[in-house]
Image (cartoon, coloured by chain):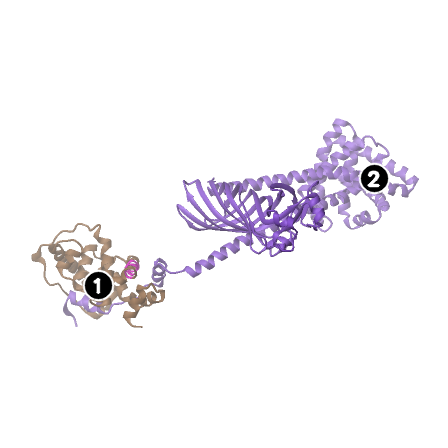
Amino acid sequence: MSLDQLIKNCINKDAQAQSQLYKQFASKLFSLCLKYSKNYAEAEDNLHDAFITIFNKIEQYNNKGSFEGWLKRIAINTSLQRYREDVGVYDIMNEDNIKDVSVDLNENDVSINYLLQIIQELPDRYRLVFNLYVLDGYSHVEISELINISVGTSKSNLARARMILKDKIEAYNATSNSRSL
Amino acid sequence: MNDKKNIDRLFQEKFKDFEVAPNDAVWERISESLPKKKKKRRVIALWWQIGGVAAMVTLLLTVGVSVFNTDDNQKFPIVNTENSTNDLNNNNNNNNNTNTPTKKSPNELNTVESNNKTQIVNSNIDSEQESNLNDSKDDTSQKTSTSKQLTIPNNYNQKLNSVANNSKVVKRHKSSQKQHRLSSNKDKSTKIANQTKTSNSNLKKNDNTQLASETEIKSTIKEALENSNTGIAANKSSENTKSETPHTDLSKTNKPEAENSLIEIPEKASIEDAIAEQNTTIEEEEEEEKEDDQNRWSIAPNVAPVYFSSLGAGSPLDQQFNENSKSSDITMSYGIAGSYAISKKLKIRAGVHRVNLSQTTSDVYAYTGAETAARGVDAEFSNISFKGGEQHVSLISSTMMNKASTPELFNTKIAGKIDQKFGFIEVPLELEYNLLDKKFGINVIGGFSTFILNENEIYADINGSSTLIGEANNINTTSFSANFGLGMNYNLSKQWHINLEPTLKYQINTFNNTTGDFKPFFIGVYTGLSFKF
């Protein structure tokens, strides 16, 4: 069944088509939800909410842009929704301090699970900004609109996130190196 | 190997192909939340529910009937066991009758009552006494103790030591007999003459041994016992000297008649008390259950215009009227109905209605008296019982007549009509299933009604005036109908509802001996105000 046909059947609330659509995209969207969420359970909740929105609004998909992109936007928006109401207060970093953060590491040694873990451990807004900007290609302007912060705040939050992540990766490397020694 | 890498690039590369399959439970939750089309399944579920309720009603009825039947059965076995255990009482009492016949009766009552009390409680055990050794022993020991307690004060009050001890002796004797069950039970059932001998001998032994063992018994009672023993011994010797046959006769004849009557009355009363108590406790439980769910009951007085008609061309009166045009006045039915909500969707309801029906058969000539005789018209109407003094009424359908060949008199007469009126007390039992349960509700109703005939009249136009000529004799005094209805209700408040229920009632055996294809039914639009509580 072509994707177009699958979408049509989903518009007609065909249970089998809905199940197939879920199977096809659940893994991709769940990884997205994991990045944007504090923990596994929250990611599951976001995935659930995202698919409910997808199935209820699938007729609004108008074939502009990729279907997968549409799905991802819904998943990201659903994840962001949680943080729009109460976004904590973060101190704004001086823009002078913002620079490329490099980290000294053996990339094969760092597991994806650890990277996910340290992303999830970030403060909520740092995590959102880092994900949006670095992993999902949003600009600071888009981010500022999405989560209702200023562009400066977005940049500042990104720099903070990078620093925290760098520290954690270096600490990880130190322990794994000492372990290997 | 340690390259200085941009942290963004590290994450981008690592997360490029990052996919994690979520738990299956997530999809289950999603699919449950999604709206689905399930219309077909709902219809099936509806029939299952209705079927289930019908099965439940049937089950309740059968259980109810069987419970009532077992109540009756229970009475007799208890009486029987009582008789068998009291056989010995009688024997011994009969023995002692010779000594103190006048003083016997009050004490016998005491023993009987005490027995009843214990035996009703342990009725099951009693009935299985012979099969269960241990049970019966316990039972009898209980009995003896209770009877002792009951009889001892009487002894003091009445100072009927010998008689009182008789009762005790009887109890002892019973217990001893149960201990010697194998031998003595056989004796009991087969050889009464022998039994009295052996049991009397047992009596002495067991009384003595048991008295010795039971320290709780007071010395006065001991003395009394000894006295009684000697008394019994005296009785026995005197009886033995006579002969065995009169003795057996006594025990056989006196026992069942006199004793049973004494036993049965208090026992039945006490059983009924026990049943009544049980019923009240059950009712209390039911009431508690009802209190949990509010507004399950409702009561609705209602009134309905009713139109009576028939599916086929036929007549309940006579074959010649089959083709006549028939009409029906719209009559009124009124009554009251109560309902109980089994579930949110389903109600069971019953009620009492008064319903009057009428049917008018047109184009009928009616003649009386001499006119009929002169014409030689056959006046045999098997379905009509003419009332006294009007026997000569004759009814002829105009469809039967050929204008050309009939006498002039007929042609000049104006055809009249027959009015048949009949009324019933209707007791409907129906189920009501809610299709829509909002401010405005829709439900379907199905069930049956029982009709009890209470009005039955036939009028005919005689000489231009409507006259009561008799009654139909083919209307069953009890008949039934199958009911189908569509109910609509409007909720005025939580408790008050207006109901409108067009209902078809197809009458099943209202008429016995109809002619043609006469399938009567009536349609009523039942309107009422129901009150939930």
* Relative horizontal placement of residue A162, taking residue B197 as reference (left or right): left
Q: Is residue A181 visible?
A: no
> Where residue B338 sits in the image (x, y, percent)?
52, 42
Q: Is residue A179 visible?
A: yes
Q: Chain of mark 1?
A: A
* B9 and B500: which is toward the camera: B500
> Where residue A84 sits in the image (x, y, percent)?
21, 52
Q: Colour of chain A?
A: brown
| Residue B155 in the image: above or below residue B459 | above
Q: Which mark is residue B363?
A: none
Q: Chain of mark 2?
A: B
State the residue at coordinates (14%, 68%): B5
Q: Quadrant of the N terminus of chain B?
A: bottom left
Which lettered chain is shown in purple? B
Dominant secondary structure (helix, strand or loop) of the stretch shown in magenta: helix
| Residue B195 in the image: above or below residue A126 | above
Q: Which mark is residue B254?
A: 2
Quarter-of-image position of residue B200:
top right
State the residue at coordinates (73%, 37%): B265
Q: How many marks?
A: 2
Magenta segment boundaries in residue numbering: A47-54
> Where residue A149 sits in the image (x, y, percent)?
15, 53
> Where residue B209 sits in the image (x, y, percent)?
77, 40
* Relative horizontal placement of residue B439, taking residue B157 as reference (left or right): left
* B498 and B162: which is toward the camera: B498
Q: Is residue A150 magenta?
A: no
* Relative horizontal placement of residue B206, taking residue B412 as reference (left or right): right
- SS at badge 2: helix
Q: Which mark is residue A172?
A: 1
